[in-house]
Amino acid sequence: MTSSKKIYELSPQRLYARVFTRILGDKIDEKEVEYLVGEVPRSDLGDYGIQIARFAKRIGVELEELSETVARELSREEVVADTRTIGGFLNIILDLEKLSELVFTAARNDREEYGLVRVEKPEKIVVEHTSANPVHPLHIGHGRNASLGDTLARLLRARGHSVQTRFYINDMGRQVAVLAYGYILAGRKPPRSIKPDHWIGQVYAITHTLVDIENLKKELEKLRLEGRDEEYREKLAELDNLVANALELREKDPELFDKIANAIKNRDPEREIATIMKKYEYREDKEIIDSIREAVELCLEGFKETLSRLGIEIDVWDWESDLAWSGEVEELLHRVKSSTYRSLHKGALALNLQQLLDDKEIREKLGIRQGEEIPPLILVRSDGTTLYTTRDIVYTLKKFREYNADKVYNVIAAEQRLEQLQVRLSLIALGYRREGLNTIHYLYEMVNLPGQKMSGRRGKYISLDELIDRAVEQAKIEVEKRNPELLQEEKNKIAETIGTAAIKYTLVSVSPLKPITFNLEEALDFTKNSAPYILYTHARAANILAKYNQPIEWEKIEYTTATENPHRKKLLKQLYTYPYIFVKSADEQKPELLINHTYNIADTFNQWYTSRDHVLGEKDPGKKQYKLALVYTTKQTLANTLKILGIKPLQKM
RNA sequence: GGGCCCGUAGCUCAGCCAGGACAGAGCGCUGGCCUCCUAAGCCAGUGGUCGGGGGUUCAAAUCCCCCCGGGCCCGCCA
């Protein structure tokens, strides 16, 4: 039975790799051969090729001799019609008839799974992503994190791994204490009329700003008494800004603002917030515990709603406080105390991680350069309380333990690189070498908005919800224009898919290492390299099959037509390499490879579609079946990539 | 001061790790294409000292060194 797995093994990369290994054994690196195989820029020179001269030279064989042997072996492969050597290159010419037959058979057999080649040894993988602070709605940066994390999880699942996604709820920081303080002052009564995380964001921003104003006033009073005029004037300007900000916040929700503002008068918010933090950490006060949990739950409810629009669902939600309360942190600290890496840093318990860098495996796996300096990591403050990173180490172990994981991916911004390195090195120092080496920091750069500084504390941000709404709105206008006859409900559904898909695609198709300046105009540009383009192409393909409205007659396909049309030839080749690209994309955790290849497929399909080589108008029954099979395989391939992006393919749009 | 990442067409990016066959897309701009399977489409044209300078190599956008510009990190914050 022909499957995608076979197509993968017949991909040019695998063909060359196998043949080279067969001939040269371990004198070459199979992966290197795979990587060097490329498309031939001029079709008269062949389809795919490799620069064979470099190998001949390195291994010390005559070029002619090596070329001849390799060419002979390649020719024996069923998809290879011929070989050609030009200027140090050894190229293959594909047997397109045979290739069509194999690809179509695989597509027919694998149906929904075409191209999604499964690993032989599936792993258990945890992907932690998003993990936004639960004090305000998600913004575009969280959107990048969530989209990358979700796509990574789906990609690994499609590859056959068992994947669990987790979200770490940071409920122990000062931020949450500030929120809880305001939440209590506001009477713990969330309105039903507003999305809960947006309301929480308001409470947080109002409280934070008011607390800052109180603090600043106290400072000013002190400066005034001490007669430090210059500093006084500076701080006064700061206060003006804060007050202006407070007024803006009041405008959005006067009732809420006044309630918190009145309640906060004549109190000592700073001390009360500190008390909340401490009582929560030591699990002392039921009202405080309940309030924090309530407020955070409200925010998470909003998160889930937003994420769900993007097709994202988190499997497990972990509370940082549960870790702190569980005793696992103490257990870890026992280990630290008896560790040889233990040190005291001005009286605080710490781990000295520097010497671990002598280990080459550690350096390579964690991506650290020889000379890099890693500062000691403090785990316990002088007052005996633990730090965020301490709990993060415990959390990483928990992820491994609870899912029995082989690997843990942490989708976390690049700015946390050092912290993530310290977590992993600490694990190794404490005897968890396997866990330390198999924790992967899947890092991405920030998303900025042009000309805007966002601030959660001040309530200045553009939420992911607003961006999605804008995109959906835009899509709705188009749908309305194109398909006025559809039911309103259906139009809404289509617009929702297009809008959310556009945002997600924009965030995932760029390499995670590029800092993005998010441009709404561009994200709303639904042409060419965009999710709507892929969706549109899928709808076109689906439409052809829907109009034909019969099963494809695979046995009647006339394969000799394979070489007749340049667009079809190109498309076939791209469908043929799809399984290989999928595998590479999954195994290297680079979703953008798959996305770009899929875009190329869509592009070629549209070129063919708009050429005069129509499918349904084809008179020759055998040729018609060939074209239908090509449409079918394209549609399935597009659908599969969309599935990996968590986007539902549309039948019409 | 030290470290990490980014710098490729007017704009947004792919290619760099694994050096080689003319440096590729999209947007923009110019001009075309709907009696024919959805024009969110297609075709043609326009546009590049690959940040700069050295080096290694038969061959450098790709590897090494220096410099410049941008982002981020170097907390008993989270």
Image (spheres, rainbow, N blue to C red):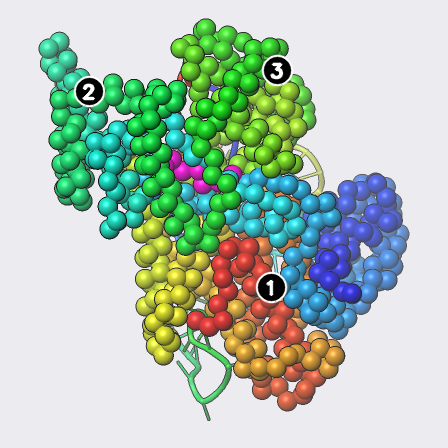
Residue at 21% in and 35% down: A187
Span colored in magenta: A128-134
* Quadrant that contains the C terminus of chain A: bottom left
First in residue order: circle 3 vs circle 1 = 3
Say if mark 3 contacts mark 1, CB within 8 Å: no
Residue A572 occupies which quadrant of the picture?
bottom right
Crowd around label 1: few <14 · some 14–19 · many ≥20 (10 Å) = many
Pointer 3 residue: A355
Q: Nearer the viewer, residue B54 or A217?
A: A217
Residue on which the image places disc 1: A637
Circles 3 and 2: CB distance less than 8 Å? no
Q: From what the image shows, is residue A107 above or below residue A613? A: above
Instruction: From the top left corner, tell me how far across and down residue A58 is, in percent.
Output: 80, 41
**Label 3 lies in what chain?**
A
User: What kind of secondary structure does the magenta stretch mostly adopt?
Assistant: loop
Asked if residue A154 shows in the view, the reply is yes
Q: Which amino acid lies under the numbered mark 2 shown in the image of this protein?
A: Asp
The amino acid beneath tag 3 is Gln
Q: Is residue A306 left or right of residue A599?
A: left
Instruction: Identify which amino acid the numbered label 1 is placed on.
Output: Thr
- Left or right position of A523 against A559: left
Residue under mark 2: which chain is it in? A
Helix, strand or loop at disc 2? loop
Query: Which comes before the other along the chain, label 3 or label 2?
Result: 2
Between A643 and A281, the one lying in front of the other is A281
- Which residue is identified by label 2? A268
Which residue is located at x 60 percent, y 37 percent? A403
Q: Is residue A440 visible?
A: no
Residue A339 position within the rendered picture, expressed as x and y whole percent measured from the top left: 60, 12
Judge whether A312 appears above or below A373 on screen.
below
Query: Is residue A458 in the magenta section?
Result: no
